[in-house]
Amino acid sequence: MRGLLHVVAFLSVIALAFWAYQENYHTQDALSEVRQLHREIGEAHARLNVLGAEWAYLNRPDRLRDLADLNFDRLGLLPLSPEAFGRVDDVAYPLRPLGIITDPIDVSSDAATDEEAL
């Protein structure tokens, strides 16, 4: 009985050592994947910063003004002025058509009964 207990304990230690060995390699793989992801995120941030700087460079007001002047024949772009905008009162909103009245209410008879009740 005692020998069986020693064999079971020895096999348990071997099984736990194998499990710990496997977990160690899984952890190392996960850590290397995390490092790779961090590296990719850093590269993406660097690309975003470069793209932001390029966008700011391309959208300089003086450059856009020069481009509008160069392409005035094709585009006809003019500088914005307050006169270019309309007023809200000038907008013609479409009228919604009235629906079909299916259950009319006689307002004049209701008003007469209310006055009589007073």
Image (tube, rainbow, N blue to C red):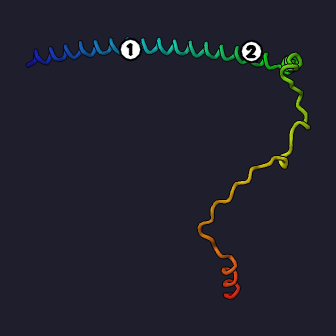
> The disc labelled 2 sits on which kind of residue?
Glu
Q: Quadrant of the N terminus?
A: top left
Separation of residues labelled 2 and 1 (CA atoms): 42 Å
In which image quadrant can residue 109 be found?
bottom right
Does residue 101 lie above or below 11 as drawn? below
In which image quadrant can residue 41 be found?
top right
Disc 1 is placed on an element classified as helix
* Crowdedness near tag 1: few (<14), some (14–19) or many (≥20) residues, C-alpha within 10 Å: few
Identify the residue at image location x=47%, y=13%: 33
Q: Nearer the viewer, residue 104 or 81?
A: 104
Spot the residue most to the left. 1
Q: Nearer the viewer, residue 13 or 70?
A: 70
> The disc labelled 1 sits on which kind of residue?
His
Residue 2 location, x and y as percent?
10, 18
Residue 26 location, x and y as percent?
38, 14
Residue under pointer 2: 54
Residue under pointer 1: 26
Disc 2 is placed on an element classified as helix
Identify the residue at image location x=28%, y=12%: 18
* Crowdedness near tag 2: few (<14), some (14–19) or many (≥20) residues, C-alpha within 10 Å: few
Q: Quadrant of the C terminus?
A: bottom right
Residue 83 location, x and y as percent?
91, 37
Disc 2 versus disc 1: nearer the observer: 2
